[in-house]
Amino acid sequence: MAVQITVTGVVLSSMPIDEADKRVVLLTREMGRVSCFARGAKRMNSPLSAKTRTFAFGTFTLNPGKNAFSLSQAEISDYFEELVKDIEKTAYGYYFLELAGNFARENADESELVSLLYFSLKALGGNTLPAKLVQRVFEIKLLAINGFCPDFSVCAVCKKPVKEGFFRPDLMQAVDSDCMKEGAYPLSRSALYTFRFIRENSGKRLFSFTLSDEVLKEVEAVTEFLLTHTWDREPESRKMIRVLTGEG
Ligand SMILES: [Zn+2]
C-alpha cells in the first residue's frame, strides 16, 4: 500500500478539470511545488471544496497515485480572508503566489519560501504597511533566497564597506562613490541598510519597518532592475496590479 504524505503549505492555484474535480498546485515546505488532484472538490458539499481555495494555508495529506498525487484531506489554518475581501490586496496576493510559484522548485525543501509567502500575505492583509512596501520586501527576500540579491555591504570594485553609494547595473552590485560609473542608481544609507536588513532577516521581522517615499523609490529602482533580469516576461498578475492601482 502506498504511503500517505503530509505536507505544509499554501494553495497557489486551483482549477476545475471536469464537473467534479480540481487540479491543485501547492507550494510546500517539504516538497516545493507539487500538483495534485482533488477528487470531488468542485462539488459545493465536498469537504475539500473550501480547503482547495487559492491562498488556503495549512497541512495537506497526499496519496501517491500512478501518475499524480491525489489530495485526501486538508487542515486549513488560514484562508487570508482579510486579504481576499479587498480587490487591490487580492491582486497583490495573486502576484506573490505567481512569483513564488515561478521560483519554487519541485521535490525540494522550500521552507524559506513558504515562510516568506505566509508572512508577506499576513502583512498584506494587515493595515499597518502600504501594499507597495510589502511587495518590495517580498521581492527582495525572494531574490535573496534564490541567490539573486547581491551583497550590499562592500563595494564590488575596491571592497571597502559602502555606507552610501550606488548600484551599478553593469556589475549588478553596489559600489561606493569612488567606483561609480554613469548610469548607476543612487543608494542612500537607508536604502543600502534596507537591502541588508531584508537579506539578513526573516519571518515577521521583515515587515517591521516603514520607509520614506524617497528611500522607497531608490529601493524600488534597484529591485525592479534585479527582478526583471530573472524573468523573460512580466507575470500576468503583475499587470493586474498596475491596472487596479492606475500605475504605469
Ligand atoms: Zn569602491
Image (cartoon, grey):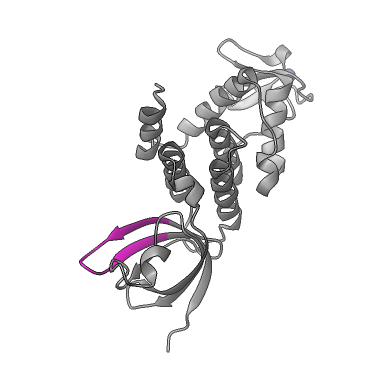
Front residue of 126 and 180: 126
- Main SS, magenta region, reads strand
Decide: is 113 above or below 143: below
**Which portion, as a residue range, is magenta?**
12-25
Front residue of 104 and 138: 138
* Residue that sits furthest to the top in the current view: 182
Decide: is 95 above or below 54: above
Residue at screen point 42% across, 46% down:
98
Reply yes or no: does residue 202 show up in magenta: no
Q: Position of residue 132 (x, y in %)?
A: 53, 31
Q: Position of residue 169 (x, y in %)?
A: 55, 22
The answer to whether residue 240 is seen in the rendering is yes
Q: Position of residue 157 (x, y in %)?
A: 70, 22
Residue 159 figure quarter: top right
Using residue 123 as the reference point, say whether residue 233 is left or right of it: left
Residue at screen point 30% across, 67% down:
44
Front residue of 34 and 178: 34
Residue at screen point 41% across, 22% down:
247
Using residue 177 as the reference point, say whether residue 113 is left or right of it: left
Decide: is 133 above or below 59: above
Decide: is 85 above or below 27: above
Residue 64 figure quarter: bottom left
